Image (cartoon, grey):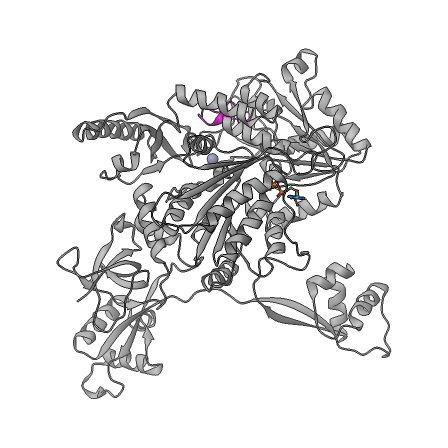
Amino acid sequence: MRYAEVSVNSPVAQRRTFSYAIPDGLDVSAGQAVLVPFGEKVLQGVVLEITPVPAVEDTREILSIIETTPVLSQNQIQLTRWISDYYLAPLFSAVALMLPPAFERKALTFISPVQPDIDFSSLEDEQKKVIRLSLEKGRVGLKQIEKALGKKKAGTIISQMVRQGLIKRSYELAPVRIKPKSEIYISLLVKSGEDFKLSPKQTTLYNFLKDKTQPVAWAETRKKTGISKSIADALKRRGLVTFKEIEVRREPISYKNIVLSSPLNLTDDQHTAYNTIKLELGKVAVVGTTPRVFLLRGVTGSGKTEIYLQSLAEALKRGKKGIVLVPEIALTPQTIERFAARFPGRVGVLHSKLTVGEQYDEWRRIKNGECDVVIGSRSALFAPQPDLGLIIIDEEHEWTYKQDSVPHYHARDVAIKLAELTGAVVVLGSATPDVVTYYKAKIGNYKLLELPQRVVPRIGGALPHVDVVDMREELKAGNRNIFSRTLESSINKAIASGEQVILFLNRRGGAYYIQCRRCGFVLRCRRCDVSLSHHINDDVLTCHQCNYRIPVPEVCPNCGNRQLKFLGAGTQKLEQEVKYTFPRARHLRWDSDATTTRTSNEDILRKFRSRQAEILIGTQMVAKGLDIPAVTLVGVVNADTSLNLPDFRAGERTFQLLSQVAGRAGRGAAGGKVIIQTFAPEHYAIQAAAQHNYISFYEQEIEYRRQLHNPPFTQLARLSFMHTNDAVCQRKAEQMKETLVKEGQARGIGGITFIGPSPAFIRRLRGRFRWQLVLRGQNLSAFLSPLSFARGWTVDIDPVSLIQ
Ligand code: ADP
Ligand code: ZN
C-alpha cells in the first residue's frame, strides 16, 4: 500500500498535510490534484508527497484524481512548503497560488446504479425513484435527488442503498464557468449597383464595407468609420447589412499595432552589465546552492529593459525560458508591447485584470511550453513555466510585490527561493533599489550591476533639473494658492510653448478633511478611524478605506453650525484649481476614481499621448512607466504626503516616489524640468531626489536603519489582532507579548525586542479595532513557527509597512 501526503483545501488544515491511502488501481503521483474525504465533506487537495508509510495510523482513501497531469511541479511543491513555513501561512493558501485559474471549485456528488439491470420489484417507492433517476443518464447529481425527495430523506436513502450495494457514489468538480469569447462582425447583404437611397453616414458605412470579402469586426468598423451602432442597426432593419457573432481566441496582447524589434547595439555600460549576466547564464546551475542574483541599478532610460530583453534571448538560446515581473501591469502596456515586439507570439501575460477566461487560456499555453517569456504582476511568478532559466523583477523596490492578504509573501524573496530550487538566474532592476536589496548587493549577497546614465543624454544634462520650492516661503509672501509662483509660471510657459505638463499629487478626491468652523468637529467614517474625503464630481463624502459614502451634510452633525471648512487637496481639488488658474489648457485626470473600466487606463494615456490635453493630473499612477517626449515639466504638488507617516520606510517611500515622478520629465529632445513643492525642503529624501542621487540617499538612510535597528540589520514581523471591541484587542495583544517573552526564555532565544503592543495606525477599520505587536530580531519565522495563532490574528513576516 502506498500513501499520499495531501494539502487539503480546508481552513482546518493550516500548515499540515494529511495522510491518505492510495486505493489499488489508482495511479497517484506527487503534484496531482485529487478529491479526498475530509470529515463529512469531499474536498480538493494536492498531493505533495508519496510515502510508504502514513503519518497517522488511521487513513482514509483518496476518492479520485481530478486531472492526470500534475498541477504542481516538483519545484513548486518545495516552493509551497517554503512559503507556508516562512510566512507561517496555511499550506493550501500557498498551493492555491500555483493552481490554474478557476481551479478552486466545489466537489459535486453523483449517484449511479451498480448494475444497469436491477430487479425493481423488491424496492421501496423512494428507492425506485433514485434508481430511475440514475438510470436516465447513467448517473444523477445528488442535488437532483435531494430536490425530488428532500435533503434529509435523500441522505438516509442513499446511504442505505449504498450499503445494500445497489448504487455507488462518485465525485466530480463543478464545471468551470468560463465562456468562450466572441465578437460581433458585420457584413453587407447587398451587391453594389443595386438601387437604394442612403443618408451620408449610411453611405460612409456602405462604402467601407462594399469591397470587403469577409465580415469585419464591428469594433474595427466603428473605429475606422466613426459610425455609431444605431446607424448600422437602421441598415440592418432595411436588410442591407447583417451582424454575426464569431468566436475568437482570447489573446491579451494585441499584435496589430506592434512593430517587431531587434536587439540594439549595447552601450559600453550596458555591455558590461549584460556580459556578466550572460556569463552566469552560461554556467551549469547547481540546484540547491546559493541562488545567483543580480541587482541592476540604473535610472529610468538607462537601458535596463534592453538588457532584460537580450538576457532573455540568451536564456532562450540555451533552451531555457523566462518570467518577467512588473509592478502594475495594467499601467504599463508599453512594457508588454516591448517584450511582445521582441518575442512575437511567444509572450504569455498573466495578471488579475485579465478575465478569468483569458487567464485560463494563458495558463494552459504556458503549461504547454508555448511561451518563451511570461510577463505579469507578482502572481506570474507561479506560472507553470517549464525550464525556468531567468527571472526578472523590474522596479524591484515596489510595494506591490508584497501580497497584502494570506499568504503575505514578497515576490522578490520567493523568486530568489525559486531560483535556488530551479537553478535559474534572477535579475532585480530598479532606479531606486530597496535599501535592503542595495545593502545585500553591497555586502556581496547579490552581484551589483550599474548603469550610471541615460542611454541618450540630452542637451543640458542627462536628467531633468529639479527645483525644490519651500512652501513656507510662499505663505510668507502671501501666496496661499496650491501652486507656488514658480510652478504657476513654469506651467504657463510650457503650455505657451506647446509642451505637456504632468502634475502629481498622491491623494485622490477633493478636500480630505471636513471640519466645523465653530466646534472643530471633523467628519469621520462610521466604521473606520479616518476622516472622510470630499469627492467633488459626485459631491459626496467618502471613506478611502471602506468606501462608505454619505451626502455632504448641510450643517455640522455635532453643533448644527452651517459653516463647514473643506481642508486639504486631492486630485479632484487640484483639477478644479487647474481649471481656474489655467482656463485655456485642456486637462485629464488619472486616478483610481477616473479609471473604473478595463480600458480607461489606456484611454487616458492615449488621449494624453496624442496631445488631446496639455496637463495630466494624477496620483502615483502617473509615476509609473510613462514615457512621453512632449512632457517637459513635472510638478509635484505636495511632496510631504508620504513623508510624515509614522513608518520607518517613510523616507525611502518618498525618495522612490519623487525619483520616479521626476523621471517622467525630459524624455524628449526638448529636455525637462521638475518642480517639487514641500514644507520640508531640507529633508534628506527630498534633497537626494532633487539631485538624482541615490547613493547619498542610501548612505543617510542605511545609517538611520543601523542606529534604529531596522532592516536590513534586523528582521521584522508584525502580529495584528482585529476585534470589534477595542479593549479585547489590547488585552489579546498584551497577552501575546507575554506569551512570546516566555517562549523566548523557555527556548533560550534572545535578541528579540518588541514594539508595542499599540493600536494600528488606522485604529478602527470597517468597524473592527486593530492592535499590533511588532517583533524585531532574527529568524522570526523559526521563532514563531511552533506557536498557534487563534482567529483574529494576522502574522506578517517582513512587512513592507507598519501602518497599513
Ligand atoms: P530603462 O528600462 O532603464 O528605463 P530602456 O531600456 O527603456 O531603459 O531604454 C530607454 C530608451 O533608450 C528606450 O527608448 C530604448 O529603446 C533606448 N535604448 C536602450 N538601449 C539602447 C541602445 N543600446 N542603443 C540605442 N537605444 C537604446
Ligand atoms: Zn470607512
Q: Position of residue 439 (x, y in %)?
A: 44, 30
Q: Position of residue 6 (x, y in %)?
A: 26, 57
Residue that sits furthest to the top in the current view:
476
Bounds of the magenta segment? 641-651
The answer to which image quadrant residue 537 occupies is: top right
- Quarter where residue 199 is shown: bottom right
For the N terminus, the image quarter is bottom left
Q: Residue at x 40, y 60 (%)?
A: 103
**Horizontal and vertical percent for residue 630?**
74, 38
Q: Is residue 357 left or right of residue 595?
A: left
Residue 455: in magenta span: no
Would you say the magenta stretch is mainly helix, strand or loop? loop
Name the one closer to the observer, 192 or 260: 260
- Out of 782 and 286, give the one closest to the viewer: 286
Query: Does the magenta run of residues contain 647?
Result: yes
Using residue 668 as the reference point, say whether residue 656 is left or right of it. left
Residue 177, horizontal then vertical, whole percent: 46, 64
Q: Residue at x 71, y 74 (%)?
A: 214
